Amino acid sequence: MKLLFVGTNPENTGAASHFVALVQAMAEAGHEVGAVVYPDGLIWQGLAQSNVRLYKAKFRNVLDLRGYAAVFKAARALKPDWLVGNFGKEYWPLILAGRLLRVPVALFRHRTPPMKRFSAYLIPRLAQRFLAVSKHARQAYLDRGVPGDLVRVLYNPVNMELCQHNPQQRSEILRSLGLDENAIVLGYSGRIQGGKGISPLFEAAAAAMAVEPRLHCVWLGDGPEAQALRNRAAAHPTVARHHFLGWIHDVHPYYSAFSMLAFPSVATETFGRVSVEAQAAGVPVLGSDIGGIPETLEAGVTGLLLPPGDVTAWREAILKLCDPSLRISMGVAAHLYVQQHFSTRVIADTFQQILIDG
């Protein structure tokens, strides 16, 4: 099968990570794949070493003729069986290009906030395949009137090799933080803002630290409340056990250093890629029971689902996973769970079947 992906978003978003992972998954599965992407952007960089033909484009809006020209040029070279889009600003351009090229179009929707009424009605009906990235997201679209037979679910693929546990990397990261091998590391990776549940997580982690002296918290990410969180930690007795590393371009090595991952959102999440990646590395996850997060783990087996914002419940769960025997057994189960449900091969095969059968 020949697939032409179009994704000219220059930003580092979850949708961009999904785009890169899915393109790579389909190429690794043996399909002939091309991608029209923003020149030298993060998606371009992510695909530069892949077996994928890259075409440069800056698709600014539905009237950007240069964007259309780039898509037509790539389509003439590749002669794709499908056009695949991942970003809202390219939905209408791809639908129009698909009609002109007589090539079917598959579109992914990564967000649950409603589109404009005109687009919300027509886009799922005009695209030959319209895909949600979780059952939670699919239900949101159905609740707004999209017929159920028009919306398929395809989860984010995860590169298992990229997320492999690496004991050497763990030792190096712990050493860089001034921690010994016996440290228990609670990891957070994501945007530092209120909706992500960072405040109750801080409270729960600090309370757990009062009981478990080996417990440390590593914060990866940046955001509007990053400095306030740092200031709060600086005024707290546990300040030396909170490590703020800021925005990290490649978080994968840090999964090896985590003993457990916290995904504490109090606002709805469409999915939760970081949860799946951590489990791929054998790291159990503490996740909020909200939105699409429950679909990323097997509660009680690969991690624990907790009430969003409940400091006491989170404190107890953190302390529960300080037990090495439980942590190890959950970590083993987590790796197998991701391999069976989210690995690139599984998702590539599922996507191919969706394209063929509908």
Image (spheres, rainbow, N blue to C red):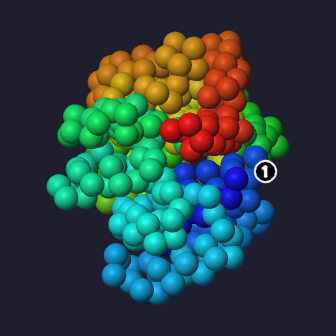
> At which x and y percent is residue 297?
52, 25
Residue at the right extreme of this rendering: 168
Mark 1 closeness class: few <14, some 14–19, many ≥20 residues within 10 Å: few
> At which x and y percent is residue 141?
28, 40
> At which x and y percent is residue 277?
61, 39
Residue at the spot 51% in from the left edge and 65% down from the top edge? 102
Residue at the spot 57% in from the left edge and 58% down from the top edge? 82
Answer whether residue 282 is visible to the viewer in this image.
no
Amino acid at circle 1: Gly
Residue at the bottom extreme of this rendering: 66
Q: Is residue 308 left or right of residue 182?
A: left
Residue at the spot 57% in from the left edge and 44% down from the top edge? 355
Q: Is residue 114 left or right of residue 167?
A: left
**Residue nearer the viewer, 76 or 318:** 76
Residue 340 image-quadrant placement: top right
Residue at the spot 42% in from the left edge and 86% down from the top edge? 65
Residue 288 image-quadrant placement: top left
> At which x and y percent is residue 16?
51, 59
In the rendered view, would you say 28 is above or below 35? above
**Residue nearer the viewer, 151 or 170:** 151
In the rendered view, would you say 67 is above or below 325? below
Answer whether residue 350 is visible to the viewer in this image.
yes
Q: Which residue is mark 1?
A: 30
